[in-house]
Image (cartoon, rainbow, N blue to C red):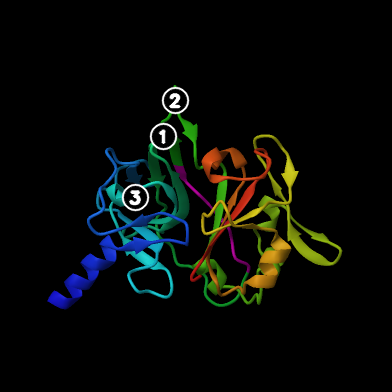
Amino acid sequence: MRAIARTRIVALCVLMTTAGAPRILLGMQPPERPLLQLEVTDSLGLPLPNARLELYTYAEGGLFREWIEITPEMLGRGTYLLRFSHDGYRSAVFSVPLRPEAPVSLRVRLRPDAPLPVGGGPPVAVPVTAVGLALGGRSGSDIIGARRVLDRDAFERTNATGVAEVFRVASVRKSIGAHETSGDWGVRLRNPRTGDVCDPPIMMNGDVTLTLTLARYQELYRLSEPEAIEFVLDGRAVPHTFRRGYDLNCPVMMVWLRGR
């Protein structure tokens, strides 16, 4: 038992994300003030004080990312894929960008748990039910926006063999505008705020220096590799320090891989 407890402590304190992304290290000086203020509630808005917060990252010596339970105070600057969960409710998975100059006040609403369909079928991109305000300047800015997420459960319930097929057969195409171009299925996303429709850039693992086109992504990665794919429908929800080279009115796809 002591060995298990020690392993858990190390896993919680020695976390890292992708190359060039932030780390959380044992003995690291925490931020002067928490960058994330978190409240998790049920669908009626009643607090769930025992909700769990998990970070998708590498544990010490790990070859693949995994979900590791943390507290908000452990997070420094960066963009993190987080999971919010509580017994009796369906977990919510989405990313949150954090920066010292604009701490985030985040309120997440969890839906009651319900049996998921088994076997094949079209995956569904789940709307994120959360409000996140970056509290820099005179007024807060929204860091969630209109957002939908395909998580690992959705991939495992489909018979699709690749991400292009997921977009082709998924019911998500009705809400975010998958379309066919020259015989190959692509994705066009509509910004609900402006109505602009774009071929979205794909940001890998929250790393602003690594963006791909959908065609290039399909050349490099298999369907088994992503843990989650986010469709950030309003590009303004990604703070300017965490984006590069795309139109603010253009939606963004964020892909989080299990390894690499």
So how many labels did they put on this image? Answer: 3
Which residue does the numbered mark 2 point to in the structure image? 137
Density class for disc 1 (Cα within 10 Å; few <14, some 14-19, many ≥20) is some
Which amino acid type corresponds to the residue marked 1 in the rendered image? Ala
Cβ–Cβ under 8 Å for marks 2 and 1: yes
Q: Is residue 85 visible?
A: no
Q: Which residues are magenta?
A: 122-130
User: What residue is rendered at 47% in x and 57% in y?
Assistant: 20
Which residue appears at 44% of the width and 35% of the height?
Answer: 133
Give the farthest residue toward the top: 138
Image side of residue 227 versus residue 50, left or right: right
Camera-nearest residue between 195 and 120: 195
Q: Which mark is residue 75?
A: 3
Is residue 234 toward the left or the right of residue 46 in the image?
right
- Relative placement, left or right, of 147 versus 138 is right
Q: Earlier in the sequence, mark 1 or mark 3?
A: 3
CA separation in Å, label 1 and label 3: 14 Å
- Which x, y percent locates residue 184? 80, 66
Q: Residue at x 49, y 32 (%)?
A: 141
Kind of element beneath mark 2: loop
Q: Residue at x 27, y 38 (%)?
A: 32
Q: Which residue is mark 1?
A: 102
Q: Looking at this view, is 249 or 154 the one in front?
A: 249
In magenta segment, residue 74: no
Q: Main secondary structure of the magenta part?
A: loop
